[in-house]
């Protein structure tokens, strides 16, 4: 794990969110940084190599088809504003969980967080 992932995991495993997260969990062909199954939420912490990554778009589409929401944070966001990151995660956990449509298999799309 990167330093940013270690810091975020320290907060998530202490159940600061009230939900149980797993780290480095496999789902399909991917390894997820963090996942909370009951609200179907994936949290990814990205370094610079993820900027404009076409692979991330494919990965996020796959996860959306499985009914997961994906939150993406840059490493520097976690390192410099862990409180803001946790607020965004808490809001996502409180929001209704989208389920994939049985007709087309689409859930919500992943989104890059924007901290204040």
Image (cartoon, rainbow, N blue to C red):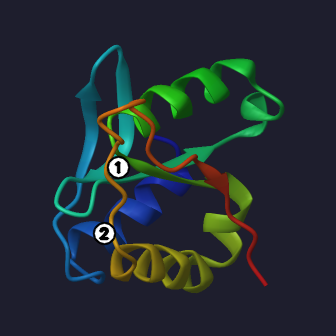
Quarter of the rendering containing residue 46: top right
Q: Residue 70 has which mark?
A: none
Residue under pointer 1: 34
From the viewer's perspective, tell me whether residue 91 is left or right of residue 13.
right
At numbered mark 2, what does the secondary structure look like: helix, strand or loop?
Answer: helix
Q: Is residue 74 visible?
A: no
- Relative to the observer, which residue lies in front, 76 or 42? 42
From the viewer's perspective, tell me whether residue 93 is left or right of residue 82.
left
- 116 vs 40: above or below: below
Where residue 14 sits: x, y (%)? 22, 76
State if disc 2 and disc 1 touch (CB < 8 Å): yes
- Relative to the observer, which residue lies in front, 57 or 76? 57
Q: Residue furthest right?
A: 52
Where residue 33 sits: x, y (%)? 40, 42
- 96 vs 57: above or below: below
From the viewer's perspective, tell me whether residue 66 is left or right of residue 106.
left
Where residue 105 sits: x, y (%)? 38, 31
Neighbours of disc 1 within 10 Å: few (<14), some (14-19), many (20+): many
- How many numbered marks are there? 2
Residue under pointer 2: 12
Residue at position x 50%, y 50% in the image: 108
Q: Is residue 103 visible?
A: yes
- Relative to the observer, which residue lies in front, 54 or 97? 97
Quarter of the rendering containing residue 16: bottom left
Quarter of the rendering containing residue 58: top right
Neighbours of disc 2 within 10 Å: few (<14), some (14-19), many (20+): many
For marks 1 and 2, give the CA distance. Answer: 9 Å
At numbered mark 1, what does the secondary structure look like: helix, strand or loop?
Answer: strand
Residue at position x 44%, y 45% in the image: 107
Q: Residue furthest top?
A: 29
């Amino acid at each position: 794990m990167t330093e940013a992932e270690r810091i975020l995991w320290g907060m998530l495993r202490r159940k600061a969110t009230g939900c149980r997260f797993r780290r480095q969990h496999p789902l399909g062909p991917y390894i997820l940084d963090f996942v909370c199954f009951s609200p179907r939420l994936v949290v990814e912490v990205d370094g610079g190599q993820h900027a404009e990554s076409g692979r991330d778009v494919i990965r996020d589409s796959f996860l959306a088809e499985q009914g997961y929401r994906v939150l993406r944070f840059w490493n520097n966001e976690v390192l410099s504003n862990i409180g803001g990151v946790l607020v965004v995660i808490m809001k996502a956990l409180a929001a209704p969980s989208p389920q994939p449509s049985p007709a087309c298999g689409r859930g919500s799309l992943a989104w890059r967080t924007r901290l204040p």
